[in-house]
């Protein structure tokens, strides 16, 4: 999940992007203003000019930015084919991100969810709900009953994020591959169990 710089430029955008990167690598608690300034190259005086709410505001905006970008990517991936193909694409994207950073950088939304900033946790929670809804809609399009699709989608988000965390801890993509393999079997079985209408 390599982070792209959005079309917006300037110190605020640079600090937000750097906060996302550092959250992915270190978590929220270990992401300080000093580190964000050093990483972004933004002038020291720009901190409270752009983020008068302090670290809470910076982490909140970084979480929202990462959630928005990831939601767009997931939506594009889900639009490209059936659920199983989309999950494999998503895992490949995460694998490349893990390998590119030596298994240091994980999901910024998980970092926010586990962090100390309540507003960022709320944004992370909403992102997980949105992703579950998107995957659920794709499962329904694949022919799975809506009620089953909703619970299956929640399980998929949890399994993928958990697989990403285990892969990061073990410095191996094998856990992600195992998770997506099992999810593929589960999705196919759920589709086969749905009676034709």
Image (spheres, rainbow, N blue to C red):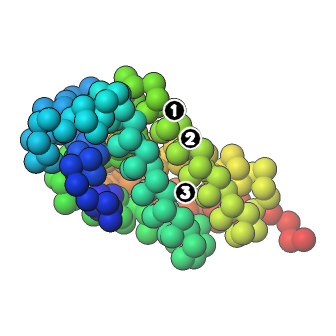
Residue at the limit of the structure toward the right, as seen here: 197
- On the image, the x and y values in percent for residue 81 come to 57, 76
Is 87 situated above or below 59?
Answer: below
Quarter of the image with the N terminus in it: bottom left
For the residues marked 2 and 1, what is the alpha-carbon distance in whole angstroms?
6 Å
Q: Which image quarter: residue 83?
A: bottom right
Residue at the limit of the structure toward the bottom, as seen here: 80
For the residues marked 2 and 3, what is the alpha-carbon distance in whole angstroms?
23 Å
- On the image, the x and y values in percent for residue 119 come to 46, 29
Locate residue 132 relative to residue 89 in the image: left or right: right
Q: Residue at x 38, y 54 (%)?
A: 176
Q: Secondary structure at mark 2?
A: helix
Q: Residue at x 19, y 32 (%)?
A: 33
Q: Which residue is mark 1?
A: 122
- Residue 183, numbered circle: 3
For the residues marked 3 and 1, what is the alpha-carbon distance in whole angstroms?
27 Å
- On the image, the x and y values in percent for residue 34 come to 13, 32
Quarter of the image with the C terminus in it: bottom right
Q: Residue at x 39, y 25 (%)?
A: 117
Is 196 situated above or below 181?
Answer: below
Q: Give the label, 2 or 3, closer to the camera.
A: 2
């Amino acid at each position: 999940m390599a982070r792209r710089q959005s079309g917006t430029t300037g110190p605020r955008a640079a600090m937000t992007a750097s906060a996302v990167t550092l959250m992915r690598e270190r978590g929220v608690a270990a992401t300080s203003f000093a580190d964000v300034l050093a990483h972004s190259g933004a002038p020291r005086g720009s901190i409270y000019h752009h983020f008068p709410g302090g670290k809470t505001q910076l982490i909140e905006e970084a979480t929202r930015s990462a959630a928005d970008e990831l939601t767009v990517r997931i939506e594009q991936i889900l639009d490209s084919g059936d659920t199983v193909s989309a999950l494999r694409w998503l895992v490949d994207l995460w694998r490349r991100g893990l390998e590119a950073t030596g298994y240091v950088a994980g999901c910024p939304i998980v970092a926010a969810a586990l962090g100390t900033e309540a507003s960022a946790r709320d944004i992370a929670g909403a992102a997980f709900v949105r992703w579950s809804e998107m995957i659920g809609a794709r499962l329904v399009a694949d022919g799975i009953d809506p009620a089953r699709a909703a619970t299956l989608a929640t399980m998929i988000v949890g399994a993928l994020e958990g697989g990403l965390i285990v892969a990061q801890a073990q410095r191996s993509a094998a856990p992600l591959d195992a998770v997506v393999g099992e999810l593929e079997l589960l999705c196919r079985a759920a589709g086969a169990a749905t009676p034709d209408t």
